[in-house]
Image (tube, rainbow, N blue to C red):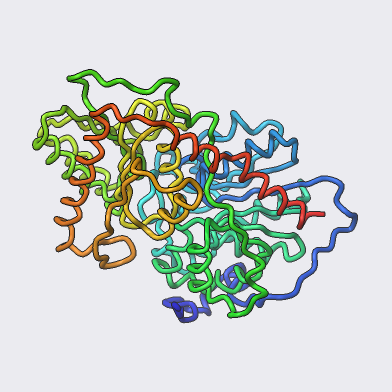
Amino acid sequence: MIIISKTKGFNEDNLGKYSKKLLSYSPQKHRFKFEKKPTELKILRILCQRPYFTGSGINLVNLIQKTNENNINQTVIYAQPAGEPDPLEKIKNPFKTFPVTFVNTKYPEIEADIPFPVAGMSDEMPYESTKFSTFNEEMLEHYLEGFSKHLNAILSKFDPNLIHSHHLWLITALCRVLFPNIPILATSHNTGLRQMVLSPQLANFVKMLIHDIDAIAVIDENQQKRIEDLYEFPMNSSHKKKFFHIGQAINTRIFLPPKHPKILSKNEPLKLIYVGKLSYSKGLPELIKAFKQVSQEIEIPLQLYIIGSGKGKQKDNIIKMGNKNGENIFFLGQLDQEKLAIYLRENDLFVLPSFYDGFPKVLLEALSSGCRAIITDLPGIRSTLFKKCGPSNIIQFLPLPEMKSIDEPVLEDIPFFIENLKSLIKKQLEAIASNDFDYKYANKVRDEFGWDKLFQIYLEKYKEFAF
């Protein structure tokens, strides 16, 4: 179990009003007190990130869409760089959005609620961001105050009877302090758990408040166990009732295999695809090296499509590395879900050699689209997938190297990691070249991981707390 010292690196005398409220909070047996028994479900949805760009952002968008389809009243608060257009404009009718604005260096003249770029749940985000590990007392107070202003305004305008927040982190904790009498459901994402390790100076502003969240949605037992350890949940049975398992879900209306099995011509290139942030922790440099070596070692022409965005030196170095020597590596940037689905259907092999990840939604999207797949054998992925859909040679698991830190491998193990990756790429390419296309597994994944099924799990939990 990880033991975190109180406000590590912070001077408690310098803390602001909201920071002190979080730090002084004690779990309580609060009861939900509505003046009148609710006659309709009114959900306040909260994301401390930008919609669409990350797994939690896609999760939010899918929840919004399913909520609209079920004619449930909702409003949404999310993080947004000042001056940028509302990303939810196309889907938000009839609900309202309340962006909490952060400094945008593209528009420095525009005033923002929070005086620095959006704080990222990962240290490498696909957009300009601030690391939580750099937060000091002043930054923490600005962050909490900026969200508090909008949360309090929404409470008076919208009067929700349920709050659904994403990430077991600062804003979910803040909601517990601000709204002790409203039920709060929180969805755990692994990047939030990661911040408990990467930003220990903030951990005690979160930990006790997460104990008092009313329901916590987790992917599986592995994620639940990590939460119990990281947040030091009491060792009793009562807290376990808070957790409910949701698995993962994708939009099966757009992620589906080709109508007819592919038939490859003799000289047609085989296509590999990577989807994710342009960062070292995703194993992208190792994938590029492995791809270049395989391209030189086999006669079949290959192409690698890299979809995603990033910021800073890591992104620049990865693009430079991919463009060197003129191999068939194409950087496509960030794509919306519809365009991504088209590319996945057109590609043959999905590769995600991450050194750290939860259960990547994009793996399910790729498998549903008819791709074969290679993914690092990280905890929970194999067991969850095989439990739902059974084992298959459609997906191959890449052994994880020895790790130096939570997302950084030991340098000496990298060559072995690349060799293993090359071996699995060749194995999968051999099956693809023989026109071994079978979309039965794709349809199994679609049956088990569709959003309709997942939303019903959420809906039952919403009704349990709101009425």
Count the labels in the image.
Answer: 0
Dividing the picture into quadrants, the one containing residue 466 is bottom right
View extreme (right): residue? 36
From the viewer's perspective, tell me whether residue 277 is left or right of residue 327. right
Q: Does the rendering let one see residue 311? A: no
Q: Quadrant of the N terminus?
A: bottom left
Q: In this view of the protein, can residue 61 be seen by the observer?
A: yes
Asked whether, in this view, residue 439 is left or right of residue 181, the answer is left
Residue 89: percent from left, percent from top: 59, 31
Q: Residue at x 16, y 51 (%)?
A: 419
How far from the left and from the top, in percent, is residue 288? 20, 42
Locate residue 27, reporting x and y percent: 67, 75
- Residue nearer the viewer, 96 or 446: 446
Q: Position of residue 45 (x, y in %)?
A: 64, 48
Front residue of this view, candidates 257 and 180: 257
Q: Going by the image, does 72 lie left or right of 104?
A: right
The structure residue drawn at horizontal position 62% and vertical position 71%, both measured from the top left corner, is 211
- Quarter placement of the C terminus: bottom right
Quarter assignment of residue 408: bottom left
